[in-house]
Image: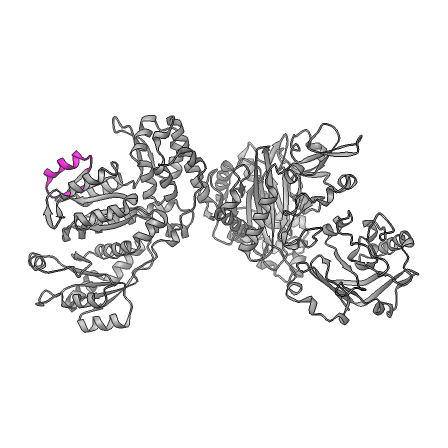
Amino acid sequence: MQNISDIKRFQFKDTSFASLMNKRIYNILLIATKYDIFILEEDGRVDEQIFDEYTSLNLRYPPRFTQVSTAEDAFNHLRDNHYELVIYMPNMDDSDMFATAREIKRLYSEIPLVVMTAFSKEVSKRFSTEDLTFADYVFSWLGNSNLLLAIIKLIEDSMNVEHDTQMVGVQIILLVEDSIRFYSSALSALFKIVLKESREFSKEALNEHQKMLRMRGRPKILLARSYEEAAVIYTQYKDNILGIVTDMSYMHGGFKEKLAGYNLAKWIKTQDRFLPIIFNSSEVSNKVYADELSCSFIDKNSKSYPLDLRTQIIEQFGFGDFIIIDPDTKEEIVRIKNLKDLQKSILTIPDKSLIYHMSHNHFSRFLYSRAMFPIAETLKKIDFNDLTNIEEARKIIYDTIVEYRRMKNSGVIAVFEKDRFDEFSNFARIGNGSLGGKGRGLAFLGNIVKTNFELNENPNFPVLLPKTVVLCTDIFDDFMESNNLYTIALSDKSDEEILQHFLEADLPESLDDDFLTFFEAVKSPLAIRSSSLLEDSYYQPFAGIYSTYMVPALEDKQKMVQLVKAAVKSVYASVFYADSKAYMTATQNVIDQEKMGIVLQEVVGSRYGNRFYPTMSGVTRSLNFYPIGHEKAEEGIANIALGLGKYIVDGGTTLRFSPYHPHNILQLSSVDFALRETQRQFYALDMEDITQEFSINDGFNLLKLNVNDAVTDDSLRFIVSTFDPIDQTIYEGFYEGGRKIISFANILQHELFPLASVLQKVLAITQFEMGRAVEIEFAVNLKNKDEATFYLLQIRPIVQNKEALNEDLTKIAVEDTILTSNNALGNGITDDVYDIIYVKTENFNASNNQLLAYEIEKLNKQFTEEDRGYILVGPGRWGSSDSWLGIPVKWPHISNARLLVESGLENYRIEPSQGTHFFQNLTSFGVGYFTINSYLENEGTFDEPYLNSLPALYESDAIRHVRFSNPLVIKINGKKKYGVVLK
């Protein structure tokens, strides 16, 4: 028995239904006389009937029958083909009617062999004198195709039982019976019941594919024909027996024993007193023995036998509805149809009923019969005597159901059903089309969280996905066609006009009820995000092209429905805005091939008065193209900020750190830098009712606030440091007065929550699973200092220029380059730069560095006015505050540079400037950075003589500016830190 405290720490693993029932019968050799084959074909239509049986029960893989009528044909087929089952129908006129069957079993002992014959008085008489031990089973055939189905399934069950019980705990129904005629009809009835019930319980699955797989978890049916056989099966599988149906009289110890069934049941009851046992007997007087053991009894001779058996199986073995009764009066109190019903009812079931059903293992049996193995197993193992009170039992059952439903819902794309979706649902789709890029990414993330338990090792910092519903692309198609929108959408009308037409169009009314169900489950505001076919695809940078709107959670749910519908239509419209069309053309895509899915997602965060925002939003990448200090490119990078993620997307100032070096934060390296280079503003959602119209600006209902505005919200307590202007010092933590600096010091420096290690795991796992570098959006909401939740919001591949990655830049001949560097930062190819400005090494004098800064500033101004980029090469550190160490330019003075090169001189050797404040802007603007010492071997090259030989557009004593007629090509492999500029 399991201790209660263990249950509280329990983590469910999902059942791998796909790994069940792996051994199948695909080909059957049927050996019979031509007459029997004719009767089977004409009267029984074997293939057709079996096919119909399979499809009616939602079963796949109906087997193929090969029919032969002579021994010679049988052996030829067995030699040339593969069969999983041989069915032999003997010819009663043969003196040795089993000779062929015996020889087949001798030669092919591994193939199950079944004898099937029509039973009559004469047949029974002949069978009683025959040795039939060569046959695996003998059946009585009355022309019913149900028997063929039962034979196939019985043998498949016996082939798979050992693996499937050990693997996931599949249950077994054991039939103990030695009458061939009786077990032939009883097995047919049993399989019919179990297969129909399994089709019913498969509806608990979240989509069609899962329904099909879930049926593999149905209880297996095994047949025992003697006391010994039954005892062996029970001993081997006693932890997996759902129930037993037994005759009263059969062989025991080599003799027919009248009360063998009673003795078997008595022995079993000593080990499991609540295991349901149903007695079958043609002698009604045997009912007294069933009553003695509190077992059910069915009269074999009753005309209603099949119905009685069905009733008892469903009632005793946990199939059908779970009827909660009053144990004193046996009256029905509540009827439970599914797991959601059980969850709702468990808190209100009367104490005595709860105790009765718990002590009889009824809860676990109900769940076992529905193939909910992890939860059934858990409840079965609880020692309810260990409980201090009945309320604790109630809470444990409730919590176990909730935990199981959470696990089942994560990582699965469920079909949205109004009566099924609730606060424990996680991800569902409306429609049958594609999920689109974001939708696919979220489904993938859900599966990663579900299968990688190490992400959720810390219960106070769980990794989750927000509740999500995706409107598939077929809804977009229907919307566009039913409202005749393509003419407007593909026209040259303004964005505002296109949006207006879309807002006036109609979405299907059926969505209203779906949205209301979603609002019931999600009490927070909603983000309505684009999820187009092209977004987040492997080779196209389509992120951020379309709109994302946010809708506050309102008391008036009908008003909220209207807002969500307006947001959905506005996202649809954004596909056809001028910028989107231009982007389509630039990426060589065709606009009318674009299909839009919509992700409806709960917004992560907390409400503060009339505004709503998370403690932290962030973006993390598995590749860091600007590593500083001890950082490595493959360790990745993260940018985090207070408030909604739009602030990061819009290029606001964020805190940048490597998850492997969370203490090494450049922006916090000095007081001056922290005051200048940390976040000052943030975004929050306006929670007041939206009265203004939706506009092409998807942030129309967002508030842009100052960090100080959050002081009164008490949301900064664990994420800021405080600047004391008197001491000119920054203190980690929140203190009254003084400027608040968004440093996340308590989290990154003091590990209030293990953000850095979670990011390490997330990046490592997702990059491995995706097979390429990834970028992930996330948010964290702190409830208090002991509890926070990490939410994964989106994943996309990092779109890299394939040429840059696949080409070995070191193979490029030095004479074809102007610059090479094996200490390069950045990544990809830039091929739109025509200009290079360089400080002449001849006559260089560090005492003139300040003057050079002014000269470069003037040149940069011209480039800004002309909107051109350039390459800037010079000795020492760029942007150094000490002019003896380099040219002291400020960032605005070189803002149009696309590549900065620090070139060391033999008589002017300065350590490269990685780690200075200046470095922050490189990463923000994606500017390439080369460090070279061309006077040393293997430390880069600079072909200054080549540049000196070309005419200058501008030249002074210290600086030259050369313009090329064709663009210079800059190639940087950020992983290998190698870069070149080609001539």
- Looking at the picture, tell me which residue is in the foreground, 688 or 799: 799
- The quadrant the C terminus occupies is bottom right
Residue depicted at x 83% and y 58%: 874
Q: Is residue 33 above or below residue 343?
A: below
Please state which of residues 282 and 510 is positioned toward the viewer in this rendering. Answer: 282
Q: Position of residue 769 (x, y in %)?
A: 53, 54
In the drawing, does residue 808 fall left or right of residue 89? Answer: right
- Number of marks in the rendered image: 0
Based on the displayed image, in which of its 4 quarters is residue 770 positioned? bottom right
Give the answer, above or below, for where 364 lies relative to 186.
above
Q: Which residues are magenta?
A: 279-295
The location of residue 723, given as percent across then percent down, is 75, 33
Q: Which one is in front, 507 or 599?
A: 599
Image quadrant holding the N terminus, namely top left
Taking the spot 89% from the left edge, 53% from the top edge, the residue there is 849
According to the image, what is the colour scheme of the structure?
A: one colour
Q: Quadrant of residue 875?
A: bottom right
Q: Quadrant of residue 336?
A: top left
Residue 43 position (above or below residue 295): below
Horizontal and vertical percent for residue 390? Answer: 37, 27
Residue 534 visible at all: yes
